[in-house]
Image: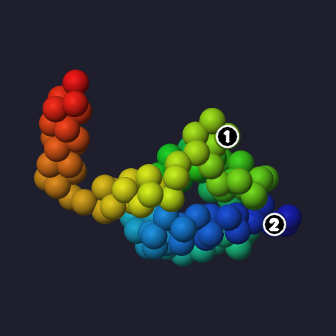
Amino acid sequence: MKNATTMNNLKKIVKAKNKSLTSLAVELEVSQEAISQYISGKIKPKTSTIIQMAKILNTTTDYLLDLTDNPNPSDFVLSEKENMIINNYRSFDDTNKIKVETYIEAIKDLYK
């Protein structure tokens, strides 16, 4: 049986986004073993899973499938600072996310 495509970039971007393979597995509702098998090419994830991974990791499906070396969508590039802010936001629980969103709205209103 032919091996599925490896997903070496998946491991890279998970690390770059300060996530763990375990936390990604939890978000995708798959086992950590499944994530490891995606990376090694032992199994291929469903298309819907690849799309969900791309959304979670703010990257393209092409990058996850090792078809490009560019992790950023061509029309959407964030600075290092913006990525840090987004990663911090994503680490918050729902209550703290609401606080951050409210604070941002208050600042926007202040400068209108």
| Image marks 1 and 2: residues in contact by CB distance under 8 Å | no
Q: Residue at x 15, y 36 (%)?
A: 106
Q: Where is residue 37, by image quadrant?
A: bottom right
- Tell me, yes or no, if residue 34 can be seen here: no
Is 71 located above or below residue 31 in the figure?
above
- Label 1 element class: loop
Q: Quadrant of the C terminus?
A: top left
Front-most of residues 40 and 55: 55
Q: Residue at x 17, y 44 (%)?
A: 103
Q: Position of residue 79 (x, y in %)?
A: 52, 52
Residue 74 badge: 1
Q: Is residue 97 left or right of residue 60?
A: left
Is 36 located above or below residue 64 in the figure?
below
- Label 2 element class: loop
- Residue farthest along the top direction in this orientation: 112
Front-most of residues 26 and 68: 68
Q: Residue at x 68, y 64 (%)?
A: 9
Residue 3 badge: 2
Mark sitting earlier along the chain (1/2): 2
Front-most of residues 100 and 15: 100
Front-most of residues 4 and 16: 16
Q: Amino acid at mark 1?
A: Ser
Q: Position of residue 47 (x, y in %)?
A: 63, 45
Q: Position of residue 104 (x, y in %)?
A: 22, 41
Q: Quadrant of the N terminus?
A: bottom right
